Amino acid sequence: MKQSARLAYIHLAGRGTYAPAFFVNWRNHRAALIILLLFVFFVISVNKHDITAGIIYAVFPVMLITAGRLPIAPILKRLALISPFVLIMAAANPLLDTHPYIKINTMVISSGIVSGTVILIKSLVTISAVLAFTLCVPFYRICEILRDFRVPNVFVTQLVLLYRYSFLLVEEAMAMQKARNLRSFGKKGKDLFTTAKLIGSLLLRTNNKAERIYRGMIARGFNGELTKKKIDKIRIDEVVLTCAALLVFTLIRVIF
Amino acid sequence: MHMADALISPVVGGAFWIASGALIGYSAKKIAEEKDNSKTPLMGVLGAFVFAAQMINFSIPGTGSSGHIGGGLLLTALLGPYRAFIAIASVLTIQCLFFADGGILALGCNIFNLGFFPAFIAYPFIYKLIIGNKQSPGKLAAASIVAADAGLLMGAFSVVVQTLLSGISELPFGTFVLVMLPIHFAIGIVEGLVVWAVLAFVARTEPALLVPANAVKPPRLIIAAFAVAALAFGGIFAWFASSSPDGLEWSMSKVTGTEEFERAGNKVHDVLGSIQKKFAFLPDYSFKATETAATEHAQEKAEPASPVCPGTSVAGVVGSFLVLFMAGTIGFILRGRGAKPQTSA
């Protein structure tokens, strides 16, 4: 995927403007993150031949997408660009595990085909759940939640700065690449070593930018922490929501 | 080389979350001890730089394809291991959340594979060792290429170990290693060449930007690394563990004549047993066969028998899609209650 398309998606998802009111609201963002982790944990614990359970767990992202009116096109685009590594691993199973697993009339479906399909289903379900979550929760809220979970401040600050400045630097890199392409004829100038100099120039610009940013931050009273927000205590409604989700995921697993 | 959630088991994912979390905590502690806030924005902006640099493609000679920089070793050479590890972890977190590059439970594995090896192994024990106290163009080239390649190869090997420990893939260890390592060896050479060219450019134009190799002490984390490696290898060797009874089982068999206690017919026990089977978080990946089918299968090993009733399986899959459809419908009904989201910032 082109980096500009990725940037546009970060811009869309990072705002987290889509949210099903019944599930993910401002107060419940923290519980939503725990529920997401629990969900992924349940999905990947599905037996490697259990197609039914894999499909049933897709209930969660499907409900989030429909109830939150999430834009389906960008999610589908990302699902279509599923990691080639996953595809190769899924494709290898039918070749390596040829034991018959299901027999429908004369057609025999091998165990490898079933386990490969389950790998694909698990991938699609977990990816769509994560994408749906990021479309519902603004990125700075995710950072606040991480701080609430006692994630080291350096890491949270790093995430905030990385998110903020990726837009700026990617635009700069795109401009540099366009300038290089306009001056290139055929493949001339697109080789590894010329590109490395381009990346080096970007690095020097980045360093200058970092110095200016630091002076600006110091002028605004920066002392190592971007926010002084107090850590929120655990609320009873968050616990109830998390327990309810845990119960639903467990019931799905038991029933199917 | 990003690991996906679908390829790991909960135990492997959880173990590497803990390992990577501990490394982030350790790195954060080390950074806090430095008491140098001036590098905080540099870390953030360099993380964004990796994103930006990844969009500048270069043609790979002899292949007709193009590639982009990974950035692990480059960040370490610019920031030192602790800050670089935090920066790499942050880049991988953003990639996981927004682009589905690697799963959320596999994030620990990815941070470990792409952050730990370049920052805490390749940089201090290969790059620094080659560069020595006096940097020269030749040493910089050798250090960049060897360290980048070694870091990537270790990461690729770690992917193989994690995947096989999870038991999801059918690929045998030898084949998997033979597929992964040569590919990543070639990728590592290209990555090393780019890192060298960028660092050489920076060394010529702004040498102060490079962290002096002798300014960074080797991390004591190597002990932790060995502990994790021991755990991983323990997991591998467990596959080849003796099928003979262990000490306790041997004692039991001598006393009771059986290696395991036979449980009495108990309804509660049976229900709990069936739930336990459903929640096999480290499943044995045997066929989900009924007892009768399993017995028949054992008796007719030569004849390919289907251990699962096809009717039930097909009905299950169709039923799953029906439930999905219902979930979508419920979602549509529920969304009527919420306010329409604003699409502008």
Image (cartoon, coloured by chain):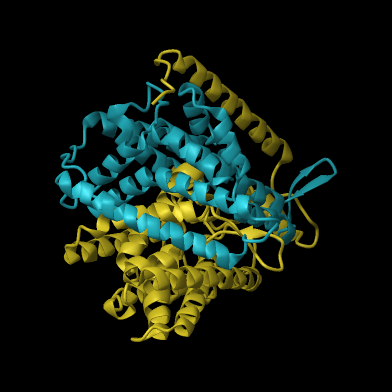
Residue furthest front as drawn: A183
B38 vs B65, left or right, is left
Examine the image and state in which quarter residue B13 appears: bottom left
Examine the image and state in which quarter residue B112 appears: bottom left
| Percent of width and height locating residue B311 | 72, 36
| Percent of width and height locating residue A148 | 23, 43
On screen, residue B329 above or below B270: above
Q: Which chain is yellow?
A: B
Quarter of the figure that contains the N terminus of chain B: bottom right
B202 vs A44, left or right, is left
B177 vs B154, left or right, is right
| Percent of width and height locating residue A24 | 36, 28
Is residue B11 visible from the viewing direction of this image? no
Which one is in front, B1 or B19? B1
Q: Which chain is cyan?
A: A
B296 vs B89, left or right, is right
Which residue is drawn at the image coordinates 30% and 66% (left, top)? B82
Which residue is drawn at the image coordinates 30% and 78% (left, top)? B218
Which one is in front, A51 or B264? A51
Which residue is drawn at the image coordinates 19% and 37% (left, top)? A232
Is residue A165 visible from the viewing direction of this image? yes
Which one is in front, B82 or B239? B82
Quarter of the figure that contains the C terminus of chain B: top left
Which one is in front, B99 or B209? B209
Examine the image and state in which quarter residue A248 appears: top left
